[in-house]
Image: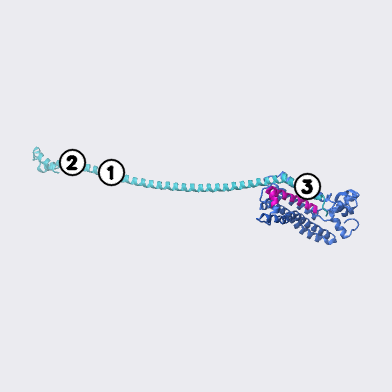
Chain colours: A cyan, B blue
Amino acid sequence: MNLNLTLIGQAIAFAVFVWFCMKFVWPPVMQALQERQKKIADGLDAASRATRDLELAQEQAAEQLKESKEQAAEIIEQAHKRANQMIEEARDNARLEGERMIESARGEIEQETQRAKEELRTQVATLAIQGAERILDSSIDEAKHRELVDKLAAEL
Amino acid sequence: MAGNNPTSSEYIQHHLQNMTFGLHPEHGLGLAHSAQEAQEMGFWAIHLDTMGWSIGLGILFLWVFRMVAKTATTGVPSGLQNFVEMMVEFVDNSVRETFHGKSKLIAPLSLTIFCWIFLMNLMDLVPVDFLPMLAQKIGAWFGADPAHVYFKVVPTTDVNATLGMSLAVFALIIFYSIREKGFSGFVAELTLHPFNASNPFVQALLIPANFLLEAVTLLAKPVSLALRLFGNLYAGELIFILIAMIGLWQLPLHFAWATFHLLIITLQAFIFMMLTIVYLSMATEKH
């Protein structure tokens, strides 16, 4: 248990070990640790960034879906409107056409009536004369009474 | 057991004697053949067993850590690298928590202290007779009297080893104090503290008292550091030796004490490291 040179030898050995540890052991291990720490931090960072990107993309997709749904609804709405309009137009056209056809038919009827009247008029005159001729047995001077009968006929 | 059936006290003393190499006034240069001769060699002798084991274990520690440090990858660490990194981080955290200055030395110093002392303490768990017996056989083969071959395996049960380390730490304490506060600051800390007076005359009177107190405080650091480690391990070793003497019953007792001692050797290594950090951080902090 006596103190001796071992004391100094031990102190020197201790100093050498500490120096070696400080020079060749501590720095590389520490560097590796720090680099790994950085790597892990970067990895976590990237992961969180990716999650954020994914969220953003999902949001965008949802928004686009909503937009396209709105557009589709609008298009359908327009189509409905257009269809209604077309039906309305067709109805109007049909009515106008019908009216026009009725109008022209009425004109034709008028014309026909007119013509029938004209024909009737001439035929009535002839028939009257023939009848009168038959009744009077040709005693009546045709030239004389022609004027009278014509006048009568004109009153028709 | 040493020699021809030694008595209990001879057995214990034999186990507690270092292998001392030095210059004896009568027998000249050589190994001490007894405690008496080792004493007579005085200061200029060296304990070959303490030096051998401590340096060997220190090299083992540095070799393992250096091997890992060289191949350290930033990827997934292997088993050994994991262990080394765990130790390094543990020490680094301890240093960070306690030492707030900037120093490249403190952390590797603490790592060396912890691992080295732990390994040296660990030798305590080797059965007490195993390596000394081996040494005696080898000594006998070389023609020495086995009774006079002394071999102490645990370096930290040699007060020279612990005091050598604590003196190195003490040198660092003084170096850091002077570097951080300057020589005058260091002297002022020793003399103007804890008693302080605004009157210069009274202050001059207080300086001797202050110096006495502060010098004791300062010197107590390395002494307590060394003796705490030495005392714990010496006592533990002594109990191992006592247990080894009681025959077959030593086996369960040895196991129980070894289990408990495992705690002590770790704790003592940790305490030595922590106190070194604390002392050095005290040295660098200004009051």
Lateral position of residue B140 relative to residue A49, left or right: right
Can you tell which quarter of the image residue A99 is in? Answer: top left
Q: Residue at x 86, y 49 (%)?
A: B21
Q: CA distance from mark 3 to mark 1?
A: 129 Å
Q: Residue at x 36, y 46 (%)?
A: A85
* Proximity of marks 3 and 2: CB atoms separated by less than 8 Å: no
Tell me the amino acid under the disc marked 1.
Arg
Judged by its main secondary structure, the magenta piece is helix
Lateral position of residue B158 relative to residue A83, left or right: right
Q: Which residue is mark 1?
A: A100
Residue numbers of the magenta segment? B159-188
Q: Which mark is residue A91?
A: none
**Comparing marks 1 and 2, which lies closer to the viewer?**
1
* Chain of the residue under the numbered disc 1 shown in the image: A
Mark positioned earlier in the residue sequence (3 or 2): 3
Q: Which residue is mark 3?
A: A12
Residue B92: x and y in percent read 68, 50
Q: Which residue is mark 2?
A: A118
